[in-house]
Amino acid sequence: MSEKDEFQTNEELTEVQVDQDTKISPDKSNQKRWYIVHTYSGYENKVKSNLEKRIEYMNMADKIFRIEVPQKTVTQIKGGKKQEKEEKIFPGYVLVEMIMDEDSWYVVRHTAGVTKFVGSAKKPIPAKESEIKKIIHRSTTQTQKVEMDVKVGEKVRIISGPFAEFVGDITEVYPDKAKLRAMVSIFGRETPVELEYKQIQKL
């Protein structure tokens, strides 16, 4: 399928969702602003990719500038193995920096996967620059969030540290700190021990 055919297909996919008589109120300041676009869940990156292609194909680089899908890195530990994945900060939303007029609105609104702009149908509402900066900063500086497939009540073996080779029962889990608390039998006494995820192994 050629790129032109792909865009025609995209048009057909979204045509039924678009109000044909909608007249957009242009931003008379003619300044680029950030707008928030609602998408089908799970289509955020696809919308970004499709829209970037449409901008190039329809020569709209002078009106649509940046498309952002804010994400953060999440580290998962399963079976003692560490895996990293990207997680959307705002699932179902894409940020678009653009000069709003009927042409630029049409290009974004007719992109496959886009359902609407945040705001009314005729007047999308630009986001505050300060809020967008916070969101983008958060996605670029986000500390890793660690997830592990353990929960309260499960047994784990400690594999490092002073309590290595002991077995404990998890009593609390602290995902934000990548730590947990477990009760370990030491010399016949149940003792609470705080451990890092990397120090344990599920039984």
Image (spheres, grey):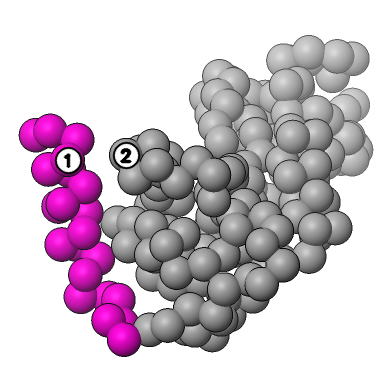
What residue is disc 1 on?
4
- Residue 203 on image: x %, y %: 56, 29
The answer to whether marks 1 and 2 mark residues whose Cβ atoms lie closer than 8 Å is: yes
Q: Earlier in the sequence, mark 1 or mark 2?
A: 1
Query: In this orientation, does residue 183 appear?
Result: no
User: Residue 7 vs residue 64: left or right?
Assistant: left
Q: Residue at x 21, y 70 (%)?
A: 15
Specify whether residue 196 is painted magenta: no
Residue sitting nearer the eye, 175 or 44? 44
* CA–CA distance in space, label 1 to label 2: 8 Å
Near-viewer residue (29 or 122): 29
Q: Is residue 68 left or right of residue 195?
A: left
Residue 177 relative to residue 63: left or right = right
Q: Residue furthest left?
A: 1
* 23, 75: nearer the viewer: 23
Q: Position of residue 63 (x, y in %)?
A: 54, 51
Residue 7 counted in the magenta span: yes
The N terminus, quarter of image: top left
Residue 78 visible within the image: yes
SS class, disc 1: helix
Q: Which residue is mark 2?
A: 57
Looking at the rendered structure, the kind of residue marked 1 is: Lys
Q: Amino acid at mark 2?
A: Tyr
Q: Position of residue 180 (x, y in %)?
A: 79, 40
Q: Which residues are magenta?
A: 1-21
Give the crowd class for mark 1: few <14, some 14-19, many >=20 residues within 10 Å. few
Q: Residue at x 84, y 19 (%)?
A: 163
- Tell me the element at label 2: helix
Main secondary structure along the magenta-highlighted residues:
helix
Residue 198, disc: none
Residue drawn at 40 percent across, 42 percent down: 59
Q: Residues within 10 Å of mark 2 (few under 14, many from 20)?
A: few
